[in-house]
Structure formats: structure tokens, C-alpha cells
Image: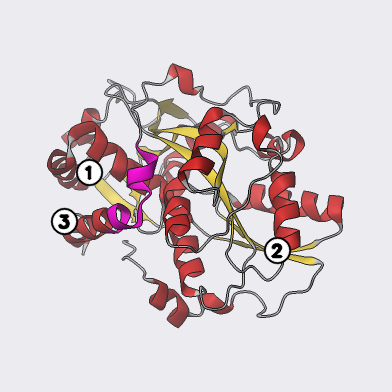
Amino acid sequence: MTVKHLSAAAFAALGFAVAVPATAQADELVLYCSVQEEWCRAMSEAFQRETGINVLMTRRSSGETYAQIAAEAAQPRGDVWWGGTGDPHLQAAQEGLTAEYVSPMLGELQDWAVRQAETSGNRTVGIYAGGLGFGYNSELVTEDPPACWADLLDPRFEDDVQVANPNSSGTSYTMLATMVQLMGEDEAFAYLAQLHDNISQYTQSGSAPIRAAATGETAIGIVFMHDAVAQTVQGAPIVAVAPCEGTGYEVGSMSIIADAPNPDAARTFYDWALTPAAQEIGAANNSFQIPSNLNAATPEAAPRLEDVNLIDYNFALYGSSEERTRLLQRWDAEIGSLAQ
């Protein structure tokens, strides 16, 4: 199963642009959420309970949400885009799809969260971080477990690796941009073409591959390491791996949509979502990212960035509209076409 690149026009044609009412009320917030469903629901319910503002929440992957916001640009229907990898948030910022806002909470945030705001001209901000890697099912891979990106090319893993499609998934786009930065562009696409021989499915959701590994549908899922840890914590035989060659990471982000129908509610949510209490909701809902507020407790099970061999990920370049569009088009032509 593959997911082809969806343009903003395609999303409009499919009806995504009417997912929420055209006219929202002053005491409402229309939230587009790009983390796991459980975390999305918990954030929505907590904010509604604490403020009395009714939340209309839609959950979609990062790439899908970006396309929806672009499709609705002439008549915005959402107020806040919360969660998902930072690259599409940065692209939305560059294209003027999101609004400038400097939260009074900015001084409480990690340096990488503030840099995300500065890079975007204060049109997005970092809310969590997590390293890219993969997880394997230790009941299916019992000998010579993979420790490096190169190991995933082993013929013994034929049709036994899953990864998402980078058009719909921010996780998979982070992998694509990571490989380009780690190996060089041509070498990265050669690697991905070889890896294709072992790919059983390009999923729509970035975390779907590790859920498949947890149930034994596949042996290996390429995901952010915190998603692999979430399966381990729930009792699945999943081992999270930080690849030996080095890897990229995400700065999960939040943006206020330009010309949002409920700008006051949007700013209220934005400030609230940067508080320690709001950021600790993730760990209570089996999400193990590193929170951006310095005063928020980091989940004990969260993979620490300092323990991972991280590349110097160029968020400004790979979050730019031109570069992101170009890389996705090349992926469609050289990798996505192989699955058709």
C-alpha cells in the first residue's frame, strides 16, 4: 500500500476543507492535531476543562495537516496546528499560512524550541523533541539484531521492514532529510532504493510501522525512538535503536493558523500548551518525547538526545518550501514509483 503525494487542491476535492464548521463560535477552538490520537484527545479535554473553551479537534499526520491548511488558505477553518514534525510547520510559516505570535512562555523553553521560533519568524515554536531511529521485534529478530541504518539492507529482512510515506508523514520526511544530510543526496536515494527491496508497506502514519512490529506483522519499523519506547512500555517485545552512523531528530511544533476564526482562543491555547502541566500530559498518555518547557518533567522512559549520535539537522533548509517540495518530488519519482 502506498500513499501518493496529495496536493492542497486534492485535499479540497476530497472534502477535507469542510472538516469543521465554516463559522466557529467565540468560545470555540478548532484544533488540528498531529500526534497520537490519545494525546490529542487528552490535550483537548484538559484545555476545555480548564478554560471552558469548546475544542473541535481533528487528528491527521503532519503532511496531511499541512495540505489541509494550504487547501483552506482562502478561508481558514482551523485555529491552531499542534504537534507533528517541525519541517512542514516551517514550510507553512514560509508560505504565510501561519501567524506571527511571541508567547510570554518563550523564556521558559529549551534552546532548540526557541531556535524553531526564531527560524520561522515566530510563526511556530518547539513543543517537544525526539530522535529518529527504528525498533525491532525481538521475538522475530533473535540473532544479530540491527544496530545501524546499513543493517536494514540485509536480505534477511526482505519484506519485513515498514516505514511511512514522506508525503503524508513527518516522521518519514525526517528520515528522508536525515539520509540526505548523513550520506549526500544521491547516495541517500541509492540507499532508499536498496531499502525498498525490504519494505513491505509504506504507511500513511509515521507511527504505524512500529505498531505493526509490535503485533508481529513486520519485524522492523522505522520511527522516532519514543514511538518504539511507547510500544515497549505497553509490553510489546520492541527494542528501540539509535542507528550507529548517526541520525536526525524532530522538533515537534505548534503554529497559529493565519487569519484563524478564533484568534483569542488560539493564543490562549498556545500559551497554555507551553506550560509544564500541559506538556506533562504526553507522558500520561504513553508519549515519551522530550518536552520543550525547561520546568516540565521529562518522562523516565524517554530516549535522551544526549545519548544519541545526532547530526546537525538543518531545520531551516529542510523545512523550506522549495527544498521540501523538491525532495518529495524526487522521492515520488525514484522511490514511490517502485511501489506501484
At label 3, which amino acid type do we have?
Glu
Which element carries disc 1, helix, strand or loop? loop
**For marks 3 and 2 on the same chain, the one whose residue lies earlier in the sequence:** 2
Q: Which mark is residue 36?
A: none
108 sits to left or right of 313: right
Q: Secondary structure at mark 3?
A: helix
Q: For the residues marked 1 and 2, what is the alpha-carbon distance in whole angstroms?
A: 47 Å
The three-letter code of the residue at mark 2 reads: Pro
Q: Quadrant of residue 283?
A: top right
Q: Position of residue 221 (x, y in %)?
A: 38, 40
- Tell me the tag on residue 334: 3
Question: Helix or strand or loop: what does disc 2 sit on?
Answer: helix
Indicate yes or no whether the magenta region holds residue 159: no
x 72%, y 49%: residue: 42
Residue 42, relative to residue 264: is it above or below? above
* Amino acid marked by disc 1: Asn
Would you name the residue on which mark 1 appears? 198
Q: Residues within 10 Å of mark 1 (few under 14, many from 20)?
A: many
Which comes before the other along the chain, label 1 or label 2?
A: 1
Q: What's the magenta region?
A: 314-325
Quote the CA–CA distance across marks 3 and 2.
42 Å
Q: How many marks?
A: 3
> Is residue 75 toward the left or the right of residue 202 in the image?
right
Q: Calculate the distance from the C-alpha at mark 3 to the C-alpha at mark 1.
A: 16 Å
Locate residue 254 relative to residue 277 in the image: left or right.
Answer: left
Query: Of the numbered discs in the image, which one, if any, rests on residue 263?
Result: 2
**Residue 134 at what x, y percent from top left?**
38, 34
